[in-house]
Image: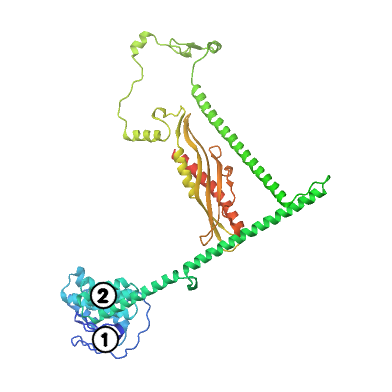
Amino acid sequence: SGDVPEQSEASGEGEDSSGDVEASSTSPEEGVPPPPLEPPPSPPVSSDENDDDLELEPEPGSSPDELLLVAMNSKEEGNNAFQVGDFSSATKNYRKGVNQLKKLNEGNTGDDQVKQLLITLHTNLSMVLIKQGKNKYARDAASKAIEIDPSHVKALYRRGVAFRAMGDVDAAKTDLKKAYKLDPSNTAVKKELVGIKKTLEEMKKREKANLQKAFSSKGGSSLLYNDKEEAEKKRAREKEAETKRKEEELKKRKQMWEDECVRRMNSDPKEEVISFEDWDKERKEAEKKEEEKRKKEKREEEKRKEELRRKAREAERANTENDDNESDDELTPEELASLRGYKKTSDGRTTSYFNNELGEKEKELIGSIEPKRIDATPSPNSAADTVSAVSKVGSVWNQSGTTWEEKDTTEWCKSTLRKCLLDTTTAYYSTTSADRTYVAIVKKVKDMTGDASVALAGGKKRYIYDFHLGLDFEITDDDNNVVASSSLKLPDINSTTTAEEELEVDICAWTSSPGDVETDASECRKALVMDVRKSVVKFVELFNAEF
C-alpha cells in the first residue's frame, strides 16, 4: 500500500485491517528497506511551526499520468527519508505528493488509484507529523484522508492519536471506537484505547482527590476551610478595630468629663462636680435634643420649600391664564369713551372707524363666509405626526398649546430615576495604601415618593417633578470583599434645582463600619455622592428628551 514501516514500540502501532504494513519488514512492491534497529533521533521541532512553506506545487501543464508518477515517486522518497530518521524531508515529499493529486480529486471525484494514493500520502504525512510533535497538523492530515474515505481505519487511528496528544481525550476516544468497530482485530487501535481508558481513570482520580481536598477537615488544608478561616480572621480584625474605636471614643469622653470637672471647680461660684456616668447621660440627652432640633428644622425647611414650589406652580398657571385673557378685546364704556377712532359694530365688536361694516345687501351678494369642515383625507404621514405629537403632551384640540394642559408622568419618571441611580458605580484609587482600589455600588433605591408631570401652556412645555428617596450602597475592595456599607438620602429632587451642585444629598452613618480603611471608604463615599448627582442630572436629560 505504500505506508512506511515504523517500530511498534515507538508508536504503539501494528498491522491494521486496511492491509498497510507497519512492521519491521516492508512490502516488497514498495521496495522500502527494513528500518534500522535504532534510528537516529530527529532534532526537536516546535509543534507550533507553520508547515505551509513545505508545500510544493506541481509543474504547470503536467498531464494526469505525469502527476500520478511524480506523486508515487514522492511517496517512495518520503518513505526512504522516514526510514533514516529524516522527518523533515519525509514531510516535504509527502506534501509534494499530495499537491500533485489535488486537482485530480477535486470534490472527491478522482478514480480509485488516485484516492488510494492520496489516502496513503495523508496517513503517512499524519504519522511523520506526530513523530515531530506537530499534532494539530497531524490531525488535519488524517482528517483529509477521512474526507476521502470516512471508514479508513488507519486515518481514524492516526487522528485519534493526534487528538490524544493534543489533550482532547473525548475526540480521540470517538475516532478510536469507530476504528475498532471497523477492525476489532487491530492491535494498535486496541492498545491506544487501553491507554485512553487509563488516562480517563487518572483524570477521575485527580478530580476525586481535588474534591476530597476541597471538603476535607482543618488538618487536610481544605480550600473551603481556608476561605472560612480567612473570613473568621477578617471578622476578628473588624471586631478588634471596632473595640479599639470604642475605647478611643471612651477615652476622649473621659478627657472631656475631666475638663468639665476642672471648669466647674474653678468657676465662681463653684459648681457641683458630677460623676462620669451622670455627665455622659447629660451629654447623650443633649445630643438627642440637638438631633431632634436638627430634624425639626429640616422638616420645616422641606415644608417651606414645598410651599414655595406650590406657589410657583400656581403663579405659573395664573400667568398662563392671564396670557390667554390678554387676547380679549372687550372694552368697558369708560375705556371706549377715552379712546378716539374706535366704534362698536352691530354685533358688539370694537373696531376702528376705518372698518366698513357690510349691510344686508352686500352680505347677500357675498354669500355665507362661515368656516366649513374640509373632509379631505389627510396623508398617512401627517396623521402619524399628529398622533405622535399629541401622544406626548397635548391633546388634538390643543395643538397650538395655548391652553394649560398637564400630563402625569410619575410612573415613567420613577422607573427612569430608579434605573439611573442603580446604574451608579464609583471607583476610588487609594492614596494611603499602594495599588488598592475601592468601588462603591448603589444596591437599592428605597422610600421613593413624589410625582411628576409635563405641562403645556403658552406654546411651551414645562417639566415639573418633585421626588424624595433614599438609597443603600456598598464599598468593595480589590478582592470583591465588602469593606463598608451605608445609605444616602436625597430629600429634594425637584424642577427648581437644575444645577448638579445644588442637589442636596444627606450622608447617613455607616451601617457596616470600614474599620481601619475608614479614610479610603470616606473618600470613596464622597466620590459616590458626586456620581449620584450626575445620575440625577442624567434622569432630567432623559425626561426632557422623552416628552
Query: Residue 241: which numbered mark, if any?
Result: none
Q: Residue 21's spot in the image, x, y percent?
A: 21, 84
397 vs 269: above or below: above
313 vs 360: above or below: below
Find residue 289 and report its image quarter.
top right
- 53 or 155: which is nearer to us? 155
The amino acid type of the residue labelled 1 equals: Asn
- Mark 2: give few (<14), some (14-19) or many (20+) Cα within 10 Å: many
- 481 or 76: which is nearer to us? 481
Find residue 213 and report its image quarter.
bottom left
- Mark 1: give few (<14), some (14-19) or many (20+) Cα within 10 Å: many
Discs 2/1, front: 2
Tag 1 residue: 80
Q: Is residue 546 left or right of residue 531?
A: left
- 316 or 298: which is nearer to us? 298
The span from disc 2 to disc 1 (Cα, nearest Å) is: 28 Å
Considering the image in quadrants, where does the C terminus appear? top left
- 137 or 372: which is nearer to us? 137
Tell me which label, 2 or 1, sits earlier in the chain: 1
Tag 2 residue: 176
The amino acid type of the residue labelled 2 equals: Leu
Q: Is residue 245 left or right of residue 178?
A: right
367 vs 99: above or below: above
Considering the image in quadrants, where does the N terminus appear? bottom left
Q: Residue 84's spot in the image, x, y percent?
A: 30, 88
Which SS class for mark 2? helix
Model colouring: rainbow
Which SS class for mark 1? helix
Asked if residue 347 shows in the view, the reply is yes
Q: Residue 384's spot in the image, x, y percent?
A: 35, 35
Residue at point 50%, 66% (across, down): 227
419 vs 311: above or below: below
